[in-house]
Amino acid sequence: MSQEEVLGQLRAVTREANFLDARTQTLADVKFNGLVGRQKFRISRVIRRGETFLPLIEGRVEKTPRGSIIFLAYRLFPVALFFLIFWSVVLVSFAIFYGLALENWQNAMICSLLAVVNYMLCVFFFHRQVKASRAIFHQLINFHLKGKD
């Protein structure tokens, strides 16, 4: 697909998120919220209920002689990243406090373990949401390719 075809296909299923207007929430053919520019896009999957680890998909489409190349990056939304960093810092701080100031190694280890578990759960749930978003994105691109055969 050409760069224009990819971005046009993406524009057709993407809308700017306006959560104050209930009419825009009922569009069934919309798969993504976000912005699609001339070469770049920032989108996220449309969801019906809150999802903390929903990925923000940042992409770039470059022209090539045989079509186009799509570069994708999946990131946590800034608020989710803030809470991950906040709780990691809090738990590590407690571990250091218990270990060095109070010499209570059991509580220090518990706080350290909780920090690791917190990070691992975040990575697990984020990758699960990336997989779902990637499947919808690939379905969108592959559906368009099947129509060309």
Image: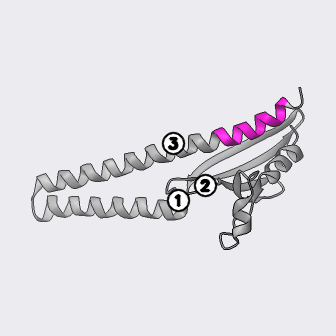
Q: Are marks 1 and 3 in contact (CB under 8 Å)?
A: no
Q: Is residue 50 left or right of residue 23?
A: left
The amino acid type, in three-letter code, at marker 2 is: Ile
Spatial CA span between label 1 and label 3: 15 Å
Q: Check whether the beta carbons of the residues at disc 2 and disc 1 lie within 8 A of each other.
A: yes
Q: Secondary structure at mark 2?
A: loop
The mark found on residue 50 in the picture is 1
Measure the C-alpha gap from mark 2 to mark 1. 7 Å
Graded by Cα atoms within 10 Å as few (under 14), some (14 to 19) or many (20 or more), the crowding at tag 1 reads: few
Residue carrying label 3: 128
Q: Amino acid at mark 1?
A: Gly
| Stretch of the chain drawn in magenta | 135-146
Depth order, front residue of 126/86: 126
Outermost residue toward the top?
A: 149
Question: Circle 2 sits on which residue?
Answer: 47
Looking at numbered disc 3 in the image, what kind of residue is underneath it? Arg
Where does the image place residue 90, in percent across and percent down from the top left?
30, 64
Residue 97 vertical position relative to residue 60 in the rendered view, above or below: below
